[in-house]
Amino acid sequence: MTENVARRTVMGIAASMTAIPMAAIATTATTAARAATEKPEKIAVIGTGNVGGTLGKVWSGLGHTVIYGSRTPDSEKMKALLAESPNAASALPAEAAAKSDMVLLGIPSASAVEIVKGLGNLAGKVLIDATNLLEFKDRRIVEPAECLADQIRAVATAANLVKAFNTTTVKVMADPALSGGRVTIPMAGASVQSKERIARLITAMGLDHIDLGGNDMLRMAEHLGRLYVGFGVQNRPKRLEFQLRTWSA
């Protein structure tokens, strides 16, 4: 990488946005959306920034058990987050992952691989990768040489990794109607069953979903994340949202 290429970490373009209050999140969950959730999940949310905090509040509000994984699980910041998250608790990251069936990565991409290494045994767990690896040159996004999801998968070989929630903002995660139309969350990963479980979460949030395919589509899912962020960088204050569908020719 040349010296004038700056690497930045953005999870779902949320790094530049403030956290979403629970009051705003609560208004987005309709009775029908709640009914779409068949079985409550137990989800470890690794990272308590904008993405992790927002999804944790949304999912706990929908009746799922959320365990926030943080290096400082007893901090004042965590106490404030727990106050806005029903059905939630906090623990160190490895403990949160051990107690959960699903694990969300809402963490800095630069440290994602090392953090995942420290989560312990993830065998059989659904690992939701919401990170975006972004590199900038001359204030424009350039393609990184690596696929971050593949790197994470290489150190969590027994987990069922699915790329998701990297193509929209936390504001839309909290309030899908905000953009004025339907919003689609793309998913990619080898485990069909894991994607079905994530799809139920997405539907309950009031969002749409689309299955892009298996592990060979992980890089493509990351491309969509860079397209989303790149459009926002170049066209502020306009934002891009994906409304995707399939059809048969």
Image (tube, rainbow, N blue to C red):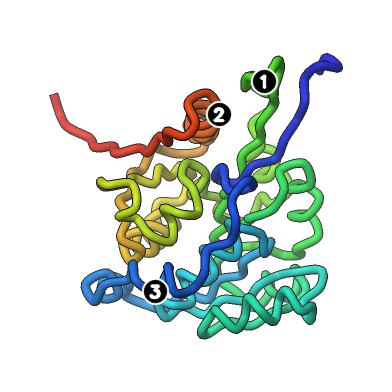
Front one among 89 and 115: 89
Residue 175 left/right relative to 237: left
Any part of residue 229 in sight: yes
Q: Earlier in the sequence, mark 3 or mark 1?
A: 3
Residue 212 left/right relative to 108: left
- Name the residue rendered at 61%, 70% in the picture: 44
Whole-number angstrom distance, CA of label 3 to CA of label 1:
37 Å
Label 1: how many Cα within 10 Å (few below 14, some 14–19, many 20+): few
| Vertical arrangement, residue 3 with respect to residue 161, above or below | above
Question: Residue 139 has which mark?
Answer: 1
Q: Which residue is mark 2?
A: 233
- Name the residue rendered at 30%, 75% in the picture: 34
Q: Which residue is mark 3?
A: 26
Q: Position of residue 38 (x, y in %)?
A: 31, 75
Q: Position of residue 41 (x, y in %)?
A: 47, 75
| Vertical arrangement, residue 143 with respect to residue 133, above or below | above
Q: Are marks 2 and 1 in contact (CB under 8 Å)?
A: yes
Kind of residue sitting beneath label 3: Ala
- Name the residue rendered at 86%, 17% in the picture: 3
Q: Quadrant of residue 119?
A: bottom right
Whole-number angstrom distance, CA of label 3 to CA of label 2:
29 Å
